[in-house]
Image (cartoon, rainbow, N blue to C red):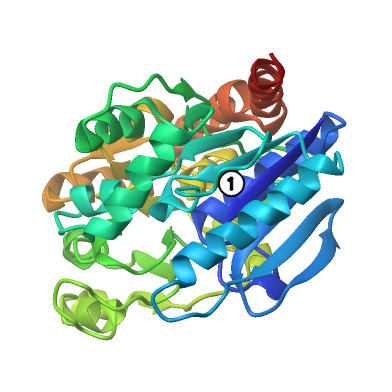
Amino acid sequence: MHIAFLTPEYPHPNTGHSGGIGTSIKNLAIGLLAQKCKVRVLVYGQREDAIFEDEGICIQQIKNIKCKGLSWWLTRKKIQTIINQLYEAREIDVIEAPDWTGITSFITPKKCPIVIRLHGSDTYFCHLDKRPVKWINKFHEKRGLQNADGLLSVSHYSAEVTNVLFGLDNEFTIIPNPIDTLLFRSNAENSNEEKSILYFGSLIRKKGLLELPLIFNKVVEKNPKAKMVLVGKDVPDIATGNYSTWDMMQALFSEQAKDQVSYLGSIPYAEIKAKIAEATLCVFPSFAEAFPVSWLEAMAMGKPIVASNIGWATEMIDDGKSGYLVDPRDHNLFADKIIDLLKDEQLRLDMSKEARNRVESIFDIQKIALQNVKYYRGIIAKSLN
């Protein structure tokens, strides 16, 4: 079986910055290769048209066509032509795309079936972030969903919210994001005896980064030796127009807490594992996610987590067993959970074991890959009838 992914991002130096969508695609692609599938990733929005191989995955870069007022249309038609050519040459059997900005709107291949997977559309994230969405993005996202041959979602929550936002009644097959539990596993040699709290991901309002300083202030009041490490790209704040979320965060830290914070900026994805290993626990006070890979990575590494209690979170973490789920706006309670973990080694060990067991039993890449293979086969068979 030949599977293709159409995406705006992929984690490789040749293809530029990548976020959660790109990481989840690569994780799944590796799992599909192990199931004897062939995988091609079509990355649009690139500086050039090119093809190269990454760990057995064929990466095809697609340069957008520039033409004032018509770029969106011409680029989609270019992608459509590529899909048709690959399908006719029997190099792909099915293509999957994310819901983000509705790239498959007005892409109508002759025969190749298209699957849309909900990772979180612009409409979805604007809703969670309480921001207005661009009408053109919502239009394309809805049209992409309506024209798809198959619909997947990484969480029940994102599927339910998406149906409400677009006024649809679609049936989604739920297959969560996978994690390579052999790659992401604890290593006692990499652990750090110093008590540290790690956040990794973009520094952006929707991920609760403006709540995190206020939470950490409370932690330091009761545990003055606690340290926090931040890893990730600094993002401008849409709500205020400020060029730097990190700049806004610094103004929120108390003088005592500020001295205990280290911001490392964006680091290569390959180095993230080491930073997780060094941490005592991880925090994710996010307001807007679909099914975050970063949480799975921390859980697979056996790290206790204190995270947001919104929607998707209960599908990932069993509250009180494999992590703590708290409203990020409840700074005192969020801080108390962090403090409990910092001071109680047995609690950390118990939660670490539960977190690791949960990802192994539910989210392991081999289990998730098999679910996807079964789904793709069904879509392909249906398209041939």
Quarter residue 113 falls in? top right
Q: Position of residue 90 (x, y in %)?
A: 85, 38
Q: Residue furthest top?
A: 385
Q: Which quadrant does the N terminus fall into?
A: top right
Reply above or below: 77 against 3.
below
Q: Position of residue 187 (x, y in %)?
A: 69, 48
Residue 184 vs residue 110, the one in the foreground: 110
Q: Which quadrant does the C terminus fall into?
A: top right
Identify the residue position indicated by label 1 in the image.
24
Q: Residue at x 43, y 42 (%)?
A: 144
Q: From the viewer's perspective, is 41 left or right of 136?
A: right
Residue type at the position of mark 1: Ser
Q: Residue at x 44, y 43 (%)?
A: 119
Quarter residue 234 falls in? bottom left
Q: Position of residue 138 (x, y in %)?
A: 28, 50
Q: From the viewer's perspective, is 260 left or right of 292?
A: left
Quarter residue 28 falls in? top right
